[in-house]
Each structure stands twice: as C-alpha cells, then as structure tokens.
Amino acid sequence: MVTLERFRWWHLDEVLPLERALFAPEPWTAHHFWSELGQVDTRHYVVAVDDTRADGGVVGYAGLCDYPDEAFVQTIAVAPDRQGHGLGAVLLEELLAEAARRRQRRVLLEVRADNAPAQRLYARYGFTRSGVRRGYYPGGVDAWVLERT
C-alpha cells in the first residue's frame, strides 16, 4: 500500500538514487533538495511510500512552489517499476489540492516535448500548452509549458 507523507530530510537517501535514475544527466543534487525543503512557506513536497518494498519505501515524490500569482509544479517522479499504474496521478492530485488550499487559480509546469505519457496525464487534469522553451532539456529537447486555470 502506498501512502503520501511530507518529504523530509531522511527521505533523501532513497530519493537521490531515484532522481539520478530518472533525470540523468541533470538530476537534482542533495543541495538542491535541501534548498527546496528549507523553504517551507512557499514549497510543498511529498513522498509516496510503500513499506512493503525490500529496497526501501519511497516509490515517488513531487513538489510544488507557491508564487504570489501562481503555483508551479517543480517535479513529479515515479519509480520505473511503478510507472503506468496511477501513482503519477496521485502525486499530481496532491499538488493540485495544495495549490487549491493556497488559493492558487493557476498552476504551471514544464514537461519534455518527447514525454507523451506525462503529457497525457497532464491533459487529463486540464493542463493545456501555453508555451515552449526551446532546447531546455539535455540533448536539446524542448520543454512544453503547460497551464491549468
């Protein structure tokens, strides 16, 4: 069974290998996560934990930044063996609920132009393309800016 918990410093030992596996060649570092987790007034980070796993409990994580006029999905990550089973939707729903609790009317995010599964997930939740960041990701892959109002 998977439960969502507030992302705490002690989760980093499990999150960092997952981050490297999913986002190489430019994964976030421990320093980056520490910086994000330290901004408690404007950030909301959660981990998805499955205590039945022999290799540790974290199977996903997600983070939201609360700006004055909008919220921004900083990251959503799901362990490769858990992708395609709805965990990304659970994490996204948590971030959208937090944006609503913070009275944000607009939520934005960036997604790789070649990540069709993620694009389908975001479309199901009402995100539409509002811009492009050319060559944003490693290898020159564009980022699509998606928005949900």
Image (cartoon, rainbow, N blue to C red):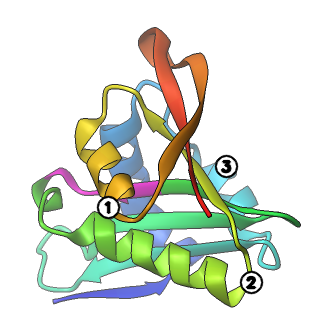
The residue where tag 3 is placed is 32
Residue at (26% x, 76% y) in the render:
57
CB contact under 8 Å: marks 1 and 3? no
Q: Secondary structure at mark 1?
A: helix
Q: As shown in the figure, which amino acid type bears the numbered disc 2?
A: Arg
Q: Is residue 26 left or right of residue 74?
A: left
First in sequence, mark 2 or 1: give its number. 2
Q: Secondary structure at mark 3?
A: helix
Span of residues in magenta: 76-80
Tell whether position 77 is magenta: yes
Residue at (68% x, 64% y) in the render:
106
**Foreground residue, 17 or 135?**
135
Residue at (30% x, 80% y) in the render:
49
Residue at (43% x, 24% y) in the render:
25
Residue 100 higher or lower than 118, as above or below: below
The residue where tag 2 is placed is 103
Can residue 138 be seen from the camera position used here?
yes
Q: Residues within 10 Å of mark 2 (few under 14, many from 20)?
A: few
Q: As shown in the figure, which amino acid type bears the numbered disc 1?
A: Arg
